Image (cartoon, rainbow, N blue to C red):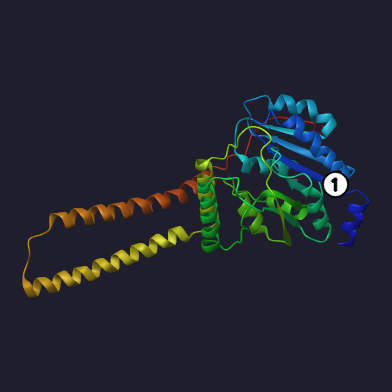
């Protein structure tokens, strides 16, 4: 701890800042100079790893103009691979003693970086931001997030802090641990929790986006939630095994009841509506259970192909 504090006081801490961007051409020219100025106040040695996730606008062109002045190192993907993979690429390329992950839309306050570094100096290996409020989000999105965090706390063996995102500081040992993972379908919030180590939460107020709109709609959030559940829990598979056992038990009880009823009272005319209802019910249960099983099989299929996590079109600002 004392060694860390000395490094901070001497401003010799090597900070890597990882920032994924996607169609942020209107923001990068104002954001990265401010980020660089903030980092200069904290240390004399830093790098900003910017991962362009297949932007369709002028993001890359604007970033190229900032490379010398802002200490940018630019990784340009060949196409859009998603934010989770962009963060993974940034961690793959960073060389710092710590890495700070953040967005380029000004929603993560720059003044919080000093608090992150201060807490790292006090011995915490991971310092993560927790938003104070979700008031700026829709009621549907807030309810969805609340349900997701509740479900993850019940069906997984990891603890994901409520309202914590990717905005955080990671020590080198955590960076190396995350880089050692080979899985291709990633849920980074789960991986942060899985690695463990000493961590601390820092509350912050989410700022308004300086420009543009978020690309994270309900559909993408749902896909990410499904990835998180299937990556860290086998409970859905076990639940349907339990449901199958219960239905089988009920069927056996009903068969015994029908047998004794027939022996005592004779055979009634079969009920066509009840047969249709039973067939449709059991057919729906089977299709739903196969669908859940299919989600896990799809994840296995994606992993066994062993394709690269991402493809890089070009790198700029890195030493040869």
Q: Quadrant of residue 161?
A: bottom right
Q: Relative to 74, say whether 294 is above or below.
A: below
- Left or right: 84 as drawn, with respect to 28: left
Circle 1 SS class: strand
The x and y percentages for residue 64 are: 76, 26
Q: Is residue 267 above or below residue 121?
A: below
- How many dots with numbers? 1
Residue 95 shows up from this direction: no
Q: Is residue 50 visible?
A: yes
- Which of the two residues, 177 or 130, is positioned nearer the viewer here? 130
Q: Position of residue 108 (x, y in %)?
A: 71, 44
Query: Which residue occupies 67% across, 58% down?
Result: 195
Q: Is residue 139 above or below residue 52?
A: below
x then y, percent, for residue 197: 72, 61
Answer left or right for 264 relative to 224: left
Locate residue 248 relative to residue 228 in the image: left or right.
left
Give the residue number, with chain letter if any, for mark 1.
14
195 and 223: which is toward the camera:
223
Quadrant of the rendered image containing residue 307: top right
Residue at position x 79%, y 46% in the image: 111
Which image quarter: residue 242? Answer: bottom left
Quadrant for the N terminus in the image: bottom right
Q: Is residue 263 left or right of residue 71?
A: left
Instruction: Give the percent coordinates (x, y) of residue 3.
Output: 89, 59
Residue 276 or residue 109, whichever sits in front: 109
Write the residue at 27% across / 68% down: 250
Q: Nearer the viewer, residue 109 or 303?
A: 109
Q: Residues within 10 Å of mark 1 (few under 14, many from 20)?
A: some
């Amino acid at each position: 701890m004392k060694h860390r504090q000395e490094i901070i006081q001497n401003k010799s801490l090597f900070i890597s800042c990882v920032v994924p961007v996607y169609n942020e051409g209107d923001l990068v020219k104002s954001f990265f100079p401010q980020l660089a100025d903030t980092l200069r106040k904290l240390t004399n040695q830093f790098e900003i790893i910017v991962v362009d996730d297949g932007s369709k606008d002028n993001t890359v062109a604007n970033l190229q103009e900032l490379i010398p002045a802002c200490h940018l190192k630019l990784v340009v993907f060949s196409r859009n691979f998603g934010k989770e993979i962009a963060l993974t690429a940034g961690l793959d390329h960073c060389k710092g003693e710590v890495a700070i992950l953040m967005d380029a839309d000004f929603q993560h306050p720059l003044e919080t970086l000093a608090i992150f570094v201060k807490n790292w100096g006090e011995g915490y290996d991971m310092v993560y931001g927790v938003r104070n409020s979700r008031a700026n989000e829709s009621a549907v999105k807030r309810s969805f997030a609340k349900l997701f965090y509740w479900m993850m706390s019940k069906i997984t063996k990891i603890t994901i802090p409520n309202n914590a995102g990717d905005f955080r500081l990671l020590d080198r040992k955590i960076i190396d641990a995350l880089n050692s993972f080979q899985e291709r379908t990633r849920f980074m919030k789960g991986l942060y929790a899985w690695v463990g180590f000493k961590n601390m939460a820092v509350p912050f107020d989410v700022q308004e986006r300086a420009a543009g709109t978020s690309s994270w709609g309900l559909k993408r959030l749902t896909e990410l939630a499904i990835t998180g559940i299937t990556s860290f829990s086998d409970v859905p598979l076990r639940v349907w095994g339990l449901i199958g056992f219960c239905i089988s038990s009920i069927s056996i009880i009903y068969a015994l009841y029908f047998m004794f009823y027939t022996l005592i009272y004779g055979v009634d005319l079969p009920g066509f509506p009840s047969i249709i209802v039973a067939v449709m019910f059991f057919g729906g249960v089977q299709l739903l259970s196969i669908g859940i099983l299919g989600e896990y099989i799809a994840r296995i299929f994606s992993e066994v192909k062993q394709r690269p996590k991402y493809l890089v079109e070009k790198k700029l600002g890195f030493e040869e």
